[in-house]
Image (cartoon, rainbow, N blue to C red):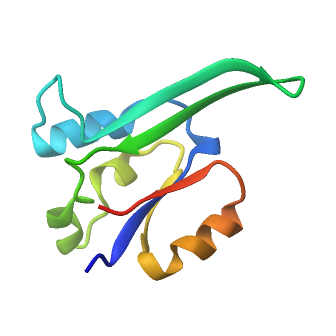
């Protein structure tokens, strides 16, 4: 049974790719594969305002850094996120935390 998930409040993501690099380094992932990948949406004009979003998306390779968490550490992507827009959250709290955060929030449960 899954106990934790990754909450990503991507309205704060700057698209720096630190999460991608940290994941690749932590797990020795090949250059053509990803544990987490940042996707870019924009620039686009929506309702008279310009939008340009970055969305970090974990892949099937992501296990939320089980070994790091067992050692009391945060997953590599969370630890190295410069915008502090990702958090490991118990699955029971994900829905409530998403509502609190408002728009542009996604979750990932491996």
Res. 16 visible in picture: no
Q: Is residue 55 left or right of residue 38?
A: right
The total of numbered circles placed on residues is 0
* Quadrant occupied by the C terminus: bottom left
Question: Residue 69: image x %, image y %?
Answer: 24, 69
Q: Is residue 58 left or right of residue 95?
A: left
Question: Residue 105: image x %, image y %?
Answer: 60, 53
Quarter of image, res 54: top right
Question: Residue 56: image x %, image y %?
Answer: 44, 40
Q: In terms of depth relative to the viewer, which is nearer, 105 or 76?
A: 105
Q: In terms of depth relative to the viewer, which is nearer, 63 or 80?
A: 63
Q: In terms of depth relative to the viewer, which is nearer, 73 or 110?
A: 110
User: From the viewer's perspective, is residue 78 above or below residue 91?
Assistant: above
Q: Residue at x 22, y 58 (%)?
A: 63
Res. 43 visible in picture: yes
User: From the viewer's perspective, is residue 58 above or below residue 101?
Assistant: above
Quarter of image, res 90: bottom left
Q: Is residue 17 left or right of residue 8?
A: left
Q: Residue at x 70, y 68 (%)?
A: 100
User: From the viewer's perspective, is residue 42 above or below residue 8?
Assistant: above
Q: Residue furthest right?
A: 48
Question: Residue 36: image x %, image y %?
Answer: 32, 41
* Quadrant occupied by the N terminus: bottom left
Q: Residue at x 16, y 23 (%)?
A: 31
């Amino acid at each position: 049974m899954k106990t934790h998930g990754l909450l990503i409040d991507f309205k704060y993501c700057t698209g720096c790719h630190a999460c991608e690099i940290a994941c690749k380094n932590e797990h020795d992932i090949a250059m053509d594969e990803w544990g987490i990948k940042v996707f870019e949406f924009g620039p686009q004009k929506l309702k008279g305002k310009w939008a340009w979003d970055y969305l970090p998306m974990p892949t099937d390779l992501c296990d939320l850094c089980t070994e790091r968490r067992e050692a009391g550490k945060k997953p590599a992507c969370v630890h190295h996120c410069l915008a502090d827009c990702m958090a490991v959250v118990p699955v029971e709290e994900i829905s409530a935390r998403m509502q609190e955060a408002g728009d542009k929030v996604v979750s990932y449960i491996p």
